[in-house]
Image (cartoon, coloured by chain):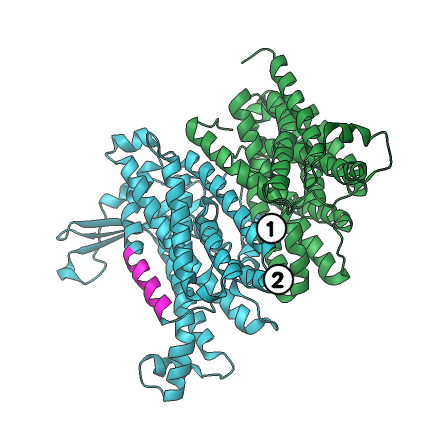
Chain colours: A cyan, B green
């Protein structure tokens, strides 16, 4: 879908927001293209030299998703063996609850919700980064070797030594990074071609999978079941330490991804065009890759390779916001968080038997995605 | 483009014959050539029985599965024009897996021989669903839609599979051995059950190779050259379902073969799909059987399943190839 040039942007300003002694301007326009209306606005502050064009539909989808996340998180914290009314949850979060409520809400339920939000956002964002990077709609961190690298180490730990469970997160993180570094080093020669990197990633992925199968077949069936549980992905290991870890990673990597967006958009035009525009292609690629891998690795280390979220969040974001590539990074992150929260709500409260979150995520994402796919017209680009 | 490939064909066929013979001879009990030959004429003797009743079915299944996966992978990469496509993308593996674990869980079936029909049925149903979803809606069938529908449906089906694995430890215990992908412990009945599907699929694939060459140029170009694109795509899809479905039913999901073999072949023979399909057909079994023999020998007397062995042997090879040369784009 082509971006329509908005020649209106330059003029027609009216005072939009009152901040900064009225020097902020806010232009809103309707521009039409072949596929329907696109509303854009320009946020501009001449004193700070800040000017950014904003796609209003992207913003609207982002806000709606965040609101939905908040609602689901709040609702999820009221449910459980000991129901807490919504008002009490709110008071407890503000620090005015009773001791009992504090224990239940802050110690038991909040970490789980926080991990769901952070890990979901990290996975959605990293999926968007990888799909933009490789310009291939089938790419997600799953097939770059990150998930299977983590899973290989985790399954090895779970099926061999029962005593090393506390190393699980660390080991999985190291496995993910190790696999990604291996792929990068193998793929690098006279510049980094995403195409070759994806192929090598698939090779690495297959190799790790073989190792996982080996451990699964050799071990006893109880251990194999623990390993399968880890590989499906769940939130039952969420605690304060993992929340802190994910928050730190997101606080560093989220803004980094946003900063890299523009350079990545230019790289997508093709290497030569990007160089002509003054982008350092190789450096951008490496930076994008590091950010994407670290995001995926931190989420996987805590929750296991929850399938589908990293793959489907960017697709959903692109289709809902009707915008291409890197412009939907934030939306993809929000949708990832939403999928995690919603799936965990169902996994914990709606299913009669205890199932982990990773079983539920495809059940939510897939039908909606298939519906979108059936509605899509032929000319709509999927990448 | 090279005009004839007679030396290459001769080399590939002799490699194939050699790998068949090696697969008959080596294993946890190593035999000599005389025993292998005698086993076809004399009915008595333990060693002869090993060859006749264990290794011959295993080798035949390896031959069929290797050829089917490689050809199906080449067809998938051609028709989707996506180098990452493999037969699994149609949801074939996920469908077969779900059907088989349901059979284990609900019906209590435990012999790999009886998995075959469930696997075939599951693969066929899910591939049909993928095509229906990929061609529904506005705009009809496009490769991208089919690929995406397949990836999404596969994820959906495998979440049911993992749910059963987590709820019932006994199902998991049996299923994990099938899930790895193996050609051991199957008898001639398995080979006979899948052979008609495989042969039909392979004949269809080779008959389509000329049309596939045109289709790779893109649907618009193919249409302007007078090709009935929809019919070609349907025929290719039918071949892929027959090949990949029967392969997964016979041996379980051997993930890597369908992806890697066409890439390796393309490096050697160039972009002509008449050659790619022919050499995938010949090269697939060579790689599968070689990996299987290696798997039998490395941790004797135990065995490494062929699904593991192909990846452990094939993945480094694939990485080295991808590194050393610019892999041809599809």
Compute the Cα span from label 2 to label 1.
28 Å
Q: Secondary structure at mark 1?
A: helix
Q: Is residue A315 above or below residue B276?
A: below
Instruction: Give the chain letter at badge 1.
Output: B
Please state the extent of the stretch shown in magenta in the rendering.
A241-252
Query: Pointer 2: what residue?
Result: A221
Q: Nearer the viewer, residue B44 or A83?
A: B44
Instruction: Give the chain letter at badge 2.
Output: A
Q: Quadrant of residue B171?
A: bottom right
The reply to whether label 2 and label 1 mark residues of one chain is no
Instruction: Locate residue A178, reporting x and y percent.
Output: 39, 48
- Residue at the image position 86 percent from the left and 37 percent from the top: B44
Q: Is residue B163 magenta?
A: no
Q: Is residue A259 above or below residue A185?
A: below
- Circle 1: is it few (<14), some (14-19), or many (20+) Cα within 10 Å? many
Instruction: Locate residue B106, reporting x and y percent.
Output: 74, 62
Query: How many discs appear?
Result: 2
- Circle 2: is it few (<14), some (14-19), or many (20+) Cα within 10 Å? some
Q: Main secondary structure of the magenta part?
A: helix
- Residue at the image position 41 percent from the left and 41 percent from the top: A183
Tags 2 and 1 touching, CB below 8 Å: no
- Residue at the image position 59 percent from the left and 71 percent from the top: A351
Q: Is residue A249 magenta?
A: yes
- Residue A321 appearing in the image: yes
- Residue B135 appearing in the image: no
Q: Nearer the viewer, residue A344 or B321?
A: B321
Query: Pointer 1: what residue?
Result: B153
Q: Is residue B9 left or right of residue A73?
A: right
């Amino acid at each position: 879908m082509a971006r329509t040039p908005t020649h209106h942007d330059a003029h027609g300003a009216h005072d939009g927001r009152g901040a900064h002694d009225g020097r902020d301007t806010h232009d809103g326009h309707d521009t039409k293209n072949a596929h329907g209306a696109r509303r854009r606005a320009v946020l501009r502050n001449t004193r700070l030299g800040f000017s950014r064009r904003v796609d209003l539909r992207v913003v609207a989808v982002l806000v709606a998703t965040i609101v939905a996340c908040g609602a689901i998180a709040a609702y999820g914290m009221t449910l459980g063996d000991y129901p807490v009314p919504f008002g009490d949850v709110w008071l407890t979060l503000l620090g005015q609850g009773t001791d009992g409520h504090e224990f239940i809400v802050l110690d038991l339920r909040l970490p789980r919700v926080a991990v769901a939000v952070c890990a979901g956002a990290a996975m959605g964002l990293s999926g968007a980064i990888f799909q933009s990077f490789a310009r291939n709609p089938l790419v997600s961190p799953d097939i770059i070797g990150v998930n299977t690298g983590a899973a290989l180490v985790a399954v090895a730990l779970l099926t061999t030594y029962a005593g090393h469970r506390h190393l699980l997160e660390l080991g999985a993180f190291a496995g993910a990074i190790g696999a990604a570094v291996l792929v990068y080093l193998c793929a690098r020669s006279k510049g980094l071609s995403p195409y070759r990197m994806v192929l090598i990633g698939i090779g690495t992925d297959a190799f790790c999978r073989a190792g996982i199968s080996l451990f699964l077949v050799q071990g006893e069936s109880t251990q194999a079941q623990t390993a399968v549980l880890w590989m499906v992905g769940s939130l039952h290991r969420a605690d304060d330490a993992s929340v802190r870890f994910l928050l730190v990673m997101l606080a560093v990597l989220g803004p980094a991804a946003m900063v890299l967006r523009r350079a990545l958009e230019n790289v997508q035009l093709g290497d030569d065009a990007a160089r002509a525009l003054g982008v350092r292609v190789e450096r951008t690629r490496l930076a994008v890759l590091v950010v994407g891998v670290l995001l995926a690795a931190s989420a996987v280390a805590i929750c296991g390779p929850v399938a589908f979220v990293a793959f489907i969040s960017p697709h959903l974001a692109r289709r809902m916001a009707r915008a291409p590539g890197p412009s939907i990074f934030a939306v993809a992150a929000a949708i990832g968080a939403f999928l995690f929260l919603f799936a965990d709500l169902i996994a914990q409260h709606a299913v009669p038997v205890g199932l982990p979150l990773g079983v539920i995520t495809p059940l939510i994402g897939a039908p909606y995605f298939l519906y979108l796919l059936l509605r899509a017209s032929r000319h709509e680009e999927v990448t | 483009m090279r005009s004839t490939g007679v030396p290459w064909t001769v080399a590939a066929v002799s490699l194939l014959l050699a790998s068949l013979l090696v697969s008959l001879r080596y294993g946890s009990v190593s035999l000599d050539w005389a025993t292998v030959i005698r086993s076809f004429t004399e009915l008595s003797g333990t060693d002869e029985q090993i060859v006749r009743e264990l290794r011959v079915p295993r080798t035949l299944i390896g031959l069929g599965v290797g050829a089917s996966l490689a050809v199906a992978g080449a067809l998938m990469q051609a028709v989707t024009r996506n180098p990452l496509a493999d037969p699994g993308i149609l949801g074939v593996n996920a469908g077969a897996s779900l059907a088989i674990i349901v059979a284990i869980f609900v019906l209590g079936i435990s012999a790999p021989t009886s998995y075959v029909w469930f696997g075939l049925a599951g693969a066929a149903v899910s591939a049909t669903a993928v095509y229906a979803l990929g061609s529904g809606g506005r705009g009809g069938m496009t490769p991208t839609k089919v690929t995406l529908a397949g990836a999404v449906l596969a994820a959906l089906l495998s979440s049911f599979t993992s749910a059963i694995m987590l709820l019932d430890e006994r199902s998991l215990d049996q299923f994990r051995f099938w899930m790895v992908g193996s050609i051991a412990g199957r008898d001639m009945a398995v080979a006979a059950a899948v052979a008609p599907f495989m042969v039909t699929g392979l004949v269809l694939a080779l008959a389509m190779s000329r049309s596939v060459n045109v289709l790779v140029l893109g649907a618009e170009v193919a249409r302007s050259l007078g090709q009935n694109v929809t019919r070609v795509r349907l025929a290719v899809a039918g071949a892929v379902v027959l090949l990949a479905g029967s392969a997964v039913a016979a041996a379980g999901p051997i993930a890597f073969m369908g992806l890697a073999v066409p890439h390796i072949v393309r490096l050697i023979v160039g972009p002509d799909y008449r050659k790619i399909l022919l050499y995938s057909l010949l090269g697939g079994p060579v790689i599968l059987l070689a990996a299987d023999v290696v798997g039998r020998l490395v941790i004797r007397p135990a065995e490494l399943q062929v699904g593991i062995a192909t990846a452990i042997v094939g993945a480094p090879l694939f990485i080295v190839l991808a590194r050393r040369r610019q892999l041809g784009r599809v």
